[in-house]
Image (cartoon, rainbow, N blue to C red):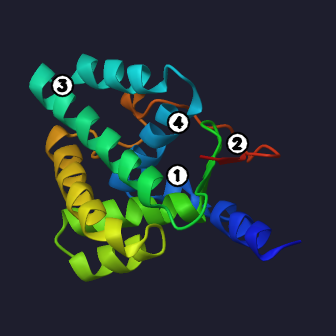
Amino acid sequence: MSIHDLSLVHGARSVGQLSEADPLAETFIRAMRCWMSAPDGPQRVSAQLAHRLPPAQSDALVALLEDYLAQLAHHHRRKLMRHAPDCPCIGADEALMADVITNAAIGNLDEAYLSGARLVDGEGLFDLVEIAAQLGRALLRSGSARQRRSPNLLIKTPSRCPNGSALVH
């Protein structure tokens, strides 16, 4: 196994369960998985938000999520890993992505920068944290991150993690 292979394994390693995550992290992870899981993923996320929120608020959330994921894709240090949409686990990379958003949203910028530095290069770090702060605050204002496992959380989870659930972005 090469060093590159080890970094992918580390990024996919299960570090927790969605059922134990704070609502903001859980909401982001489920939305990100849905967004990335299929060509129509962004439309599915957008439709669910549009069903729950006023159009301006929904459009702003979708744009921020898209900007955050684009920043990760453009400035990633290595290939980032995610679990399958229906997996109950949280992968290490997913936890870091959510941690950046949660810490930035509550103003804990030092922690957000530390987590973000493990995901993106220095050129993209400041923009990543700024977008994360806006996204996290928007999710909190929308109420999307206050309800656990409600229908707006996009994907129901099975009772165990399926084999091969880690996917490359």
- Mark number, residue 159: 2
Question: Percent x, y for residue 136?
Answer: 24, 53
User: Which residue is disc 1 drawn over?
Assistant: 19
**Which label lies toward us, 3 or 2?**
3
- Mark 2: few/some/many CA within 10 Å (<14, 14-19, 20+): few
Q: Amino acid at mark 3?
A: Leu
Q: Position of residue 78 (x, y in %)?
A: 59, 64
Which of the two discs, 1 and 3, labels the residue nearer the N terminus? 1
What is the quadrant of residue 25 in the picture? Answer: bottom left
Q: Are marks 2 and 1 in contact (CB under 8 Å)?
A: no
Q: Which residue is mark 3?
A: 53
Q: Nearer the viewer, mark 4 or mark 1?
A: 4
Q: CA distance from mark 4 to mark 1?
A: 21 Å
Q: Secondary structure at mark 2?
A: loop
First of labels 2, 4 by sequence position: 4
Identify whether 85 is placed above or below 54: below
Q: Earlier in the sequence, mark 3 or mark 2?
A: 3
